[in-house]
Image: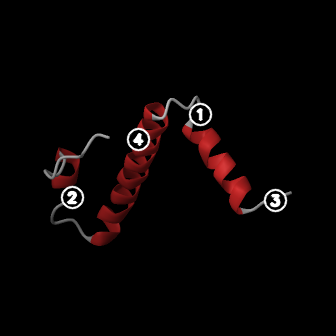
Amino acid sequence: MRTTSQRPSRSLERLEGQPPEEAIPHLLKSLGHSLRQAVEERLRAEKLDVSFAHFVTMFALVEEPGLP
């Protein structure tokens, strides 16, 4: 599995000094993107032919089997 660099990206460097109400939405979007990328990499490594959307749907069905 690929490891990430400890150096912050340029987009994160631009957030330095910004008030939290401006930085947090960008950080949350970046976190979501990183999570999706990590999950998709792992699915490919396991040779599973499942998209992130399929994975999230199956996870929700397992966690909440009584969904309408």
Instruction: Give the SS element for disc 4.
Output: helix
User: Which mark is in front, 1 or 2?
Assistant: 1
Amino acid on which the number 3 mark rests in the picture: Leu
Residue denoted by label 4: 37
**On screen, residue 49 above or below 34:** above
The residues tagged by marks 2 and 4 sit, at their Cα atoms, a distance apart of 22 Å
Specify the amino acid type for callout 2: Leu
Identify the mark nearer the N-term, 1 or 2.
Answer: 2
Identity of the residue drawn at 21% across and 53% down = 12
Q: CA distance from mark 3 to mark 4?
A: 27 Å
> Residue at label 1?
50
Q: Where in the figure is residue 29, as x and y percent of width and height?
A: 40, 53
From the viewer's perspective, is 58 left or right of 2?
right
Q: Are marks 1 and 2 in contact (CB under 8 Å)?
A: no
Q: Tag 4: residue type?
A: Gln
Other residues around mark 4 within 10 Å, as few (<14) / some (14–19) / many (≥20): few
Q: Say which residue label 2 marks.
A: 15
How far apart, in angstroms, are the residues tagged by discs 1 and 2? 34 Å
Residue at horizontal 58%, vertical 28%?
A: 49
11 or 68: which is nearer to us?
Answer: 68
Question: Which quadrant does the C terminus fall into?
Answer: bottom right
Kindly identify which residue carries mark 3.
67
